C-alpha cells in the first residue's frame, strides 16, 4: 500500500484486484458528522464497562452468590453471543443491501437502557435466594446483550462501509476511541460512586437508572452521525450472503480470511485480559490496598490516559504502522500488570503508576485492532464489503466472549483461593489463600494472557503490505 494515498493491498496469495481510484485518508470526512458518529460510543462505553466492573462484585458481595456460580451467571449469557452477534451481522448486511442503511437495527438497540436497569433491579424475594438472584441476572444479561448487539454490530460496520483508506479508518476510529474513553470513564468512575460499597441493591438501581439515561441519549446521537456519514441511497447492489446458520458464518469468515483469523484470535486474548482487570479492580482495591473507595481512582487511572494518548497513538501509527504499535502496547501492558503485584507494600503511588501504564496501553489495544478489522475486509480477495456485518458480528462476538471469559477466569481464581461471598452489609474475613488469589488473579494471570496475545499477534502479516513503500 502507498501510505500517502491509503490504497488497498490484496491478501497474501490472492491476485491483485483491478485498478480502482484510491480512497483517501479520511481528511475529507465532515468533522461534525464524524463527531456525532463518535458520540454514539459514549453510551457503548458505559455498557461495556459497568457490567464488567461491578456485576461480579454485585453478585458475590451484595447478593451473596458464590464465586463459581457468579462466574457462570456471567459466562453463560455471553456464550449466547457467539451465535447472536454473527446472526445480527448477517441481518445487518441484509438491511444494508435492501435498504441502503443499517439504521433500523441501530434504533432497536436503543432499548438497551431498560434492560440495563433490570439487570441490577433484583426484587427482594429473588435477592434472598442466591440461585434465583444468579438466574435473574443471567436472564436479563442475555436480553441486554442482544440489544447491545443490535446497536454495536451495525455501528461498528460504518468505517468499513465508508470509502476511506488505511489511515482514514484509523482516523475515524480514533475519534470513536476518544469518545468511547469518555463513556468508559463516566461508567467506571460514576458507577462505583453511585453504588457505594455494595451495601444495598437500591444503590445499584439508582446507578443503573442514571447511567442508562446517559447511554440512550448518546445512542440516538450516534444514529444521527451514522445517517450523516452514510446517507441511505436505496439498495446497494451488494450480494447478500445466505449461506446458513450463524455458526456457519463464523466458520466461513474465519476460514476465508487468514489475517482476520489471526486478529480475532489475538483480540480474544486481549478482551479477556482487559475485562479480567476490570472485574478484579474492586477486589484489588478493597482487599489488597484496603481502600474500597480507591476503585474509582484506579478506574480513572486505567481509562483517562486514552483521552490524551489516542491522538498520539494515531500519529505514531502513521510512521510505524498499526502492527508495531499494537505489539508495543501488548508488551508494556504485561509489564504493568506484573508491577501491580507490589500491592500495598509499595504504597499507593506504585499501583497508580502501573495502572496508568495499563491505561496508556489500553488506548492502543482498543484503537488498533478495531481499525485493523476494516483493513482485513477491504484487502480480502473479492468484494467482501457485502459481508461487512458478518465480519463485524464475528468480531463483536469475540469481544463479548472475552468480556465473559475475563470475569469467569477471575471468579475461578477466587473460588480456588477460597474467597467467601457475602450479603449486603455483612463483614467477612478472607483467608490467606483468598488474598493470594485476589492478587495473583489480578496481576500474574493478565500478564500471562497478554503475553500470549502478543505471541499470536506477531503472526499478523497484512500490516506490512499496507505500510510497505511502493
Image (cartoon, rainbow, N blue to C red):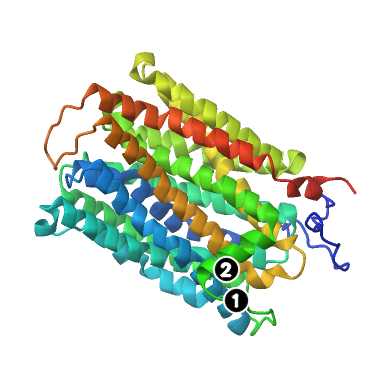
SS state under label 2 = helix
Q: Residue at x 52, y 43 (%)?
A: 269
The residue at 39%/37% (across/down) is 299
Residue located farthest toward the right when viewing the structure as drawn? 470
Q: Quadrant of residue 279?
A: top left
Residue 238 in the image: above or below residue 191: below
Snapshot quadrant of residue 412: top left
Q: Label 2 crowding class (10 Å Cα cut-off): few <14, some 14-19, many 20+? A: many
Q: Which residue is mark 2?
A: 249
Q: Dot 1 lies on which element? A: loop
Pick whichever of labels 2 and 1 is earlier in the sequence: 1
Task: Measuring from the top left, give residue 376's x and y in whole percent.
Answer: 69, 57
Q: Is residue 302 above or below residue 291?
A: below
From the image, tell me which residue sits under label 1.
243
Q: Nearest the camera: 439 or 297?
A: 439
Q: Is residue 387 above or below residue 26?
A: below
Is residue 209 among what the camera can see?
Answer: no
Q: Is residue 121 visible?
A: yes
Decide if residue 402 is on the left or right side of residue 3.
left
Neighbor class of circle 1 (other Cα within 10 Å; few <14, some 14-19, many 20+) is few
Kindly identify which numbered label has been placed on residue 336: none
- In this view, the residue in front, 80 or 305, is 80
- Which one is nearer the viewer's eye here, 25 or 124? 124
Q: Position of residue 341 (x, y in %)?
A: 41, 22
Point out residue 354 in the picture as x, y percentages from the top left corner: 47, 26
Q: Residue at x 50, y 36 (%)?
A: 449
* Residue 335: image location, x then y, percent: 53, 26
Residue at image x 69%, y 79%?
238
Q: Check if mark 2's residue and mark 1's residue have beta carbons within 8 Å.
A: yes
Distance from label 2 to label 1 (Cα)? 7 Å
Amino acid at each position: 500500500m502507498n501510505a500517502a494515498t491509503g490504497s488497498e493491498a490484496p491478501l497474501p496469495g490472492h491476485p491483485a484486484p483491478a485498478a480502482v481510484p484510491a480512497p483517501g485518508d479520511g481528511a475529507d470526512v465532515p468533522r461534525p458528522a464524524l463527531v456525532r458518529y463518535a458520540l454514539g460510543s459514549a453510551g457503548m462505553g458505559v455498557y461495556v464497562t459497568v457490567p464488567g466492573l461491578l456485576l461480579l462484585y454485585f453478585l458475590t458481595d451484595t447478593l451473596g452468590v458464590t464465586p463459581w456460580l457468579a462466574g457462570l451467571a456471567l459466562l453463560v449469557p455471553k456464550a449466547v453471543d457467539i451465535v447472536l452477534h454473527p446472526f445480527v451481522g448477517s441481518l445487518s448486511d441484509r438491511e444494508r443491501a435492501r435498504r441502503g442503511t443499517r439504521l433500523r437495527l441501530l434504533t432497536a438497540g436503543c432499548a438497551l437502557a431498560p434492560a440495563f436497569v433490570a439487570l441490577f433491579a433484583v426484587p427482594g424475594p429473588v435477592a434472598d435466594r442466591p440461585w434465583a438472584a444468579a438466574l435473574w441476572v443471567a436472564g436479563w444479561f442475555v436480553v441486554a446483550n442482544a440489544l447491545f448487539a443490535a446497536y454495536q454490530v451495525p455501528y461498528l460496520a460504518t468505517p468499513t462501509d465508508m470509502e476511506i483508506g488505511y489511515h482514514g479508518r484509523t482516523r475515524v476510529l480514533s475519534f470513536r476511541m476518544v469518545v468511547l474513553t469518555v463513556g468508559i470513564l463516566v461508567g467506571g468512575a460514576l458507577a462505583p460512586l453511585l453504588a457505594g460499597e455494595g451495601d444495598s441493591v437500591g444503590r445499584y438501581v439508582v446507578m443503573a437508572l442514571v447511567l442508562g439515561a446517559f447511554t440512550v441519549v448518546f445512542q440516538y446521537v450516534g444514529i444521527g452521525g451514522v445517517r450523516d456519514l452514510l446517507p441511505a441511497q436505496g439498495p446497494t447492489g451488494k450480494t447478500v450472503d445466505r449461506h446458513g446458520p450463524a455458526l456457519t458464518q463464523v466458520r466461513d469468515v474465519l476460514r476465508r480470511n487468514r489475517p482476520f483469523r489471526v486478529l480475532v484470535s489475538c483480540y480474544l486474548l486481549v478482551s479477556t485480559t482487559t475485562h479480567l482487570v476490570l472485574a478484579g479492580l474492586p477486589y484489588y482495591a478493597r482487599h489488597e490496598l484496603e481502600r474500597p473507595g480507591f476503585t474509582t481512582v484506579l478506574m480513572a487511572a486505567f481509562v483517562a490516559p486514552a483521552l490524551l494518548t489516542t491522538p498520539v497513538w494515531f500519529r505514531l501509527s502513521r510512521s510505524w504502522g498499526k502492527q508495531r504499535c499494537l505489539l508495543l502496547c501488548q508488551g508494556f501492558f504485561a509489564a504493568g500488570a506484573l508491577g501491580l503485584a507490589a500491592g500495598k507494600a509499595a504504597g499507593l503511588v506504585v499501583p497508580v503508576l502501573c495502572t496508568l501504564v495499563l491505561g496508556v496501553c489500553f488506548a492502543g489495544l482498543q484503537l488498533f485492532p478495531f481499525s485493523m478489522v476494516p483493513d482485513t475486509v477491504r484487502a480480502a480477495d473479492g468484494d467482501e464489503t457485502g459481508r461487512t456485518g458478518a465480519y463485524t458480528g464475528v468480531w463483536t462476538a469475540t469481544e463479548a466472549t472475552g468480556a465473559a471469559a475475563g470475569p469467569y477466569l477471575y471468579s475461578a481464581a477466587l473460588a480456588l483461593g477460597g474467597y467467601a461471598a457475602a450479603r449486603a452489609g455483612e463483614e467477612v474475613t478472607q483467608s490467606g489463600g483468598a488474598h493470594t488469589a485476589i492478587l495473583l488473579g489480578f496481576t500474574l494471570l493478565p500478564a500471562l494472557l497478554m503475553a500470549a496475545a502478543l505471541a499470536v499477534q506477531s503472526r499478523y502479516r497484512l500490516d506490512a503490505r499496507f505500510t510497505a513503500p511502493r
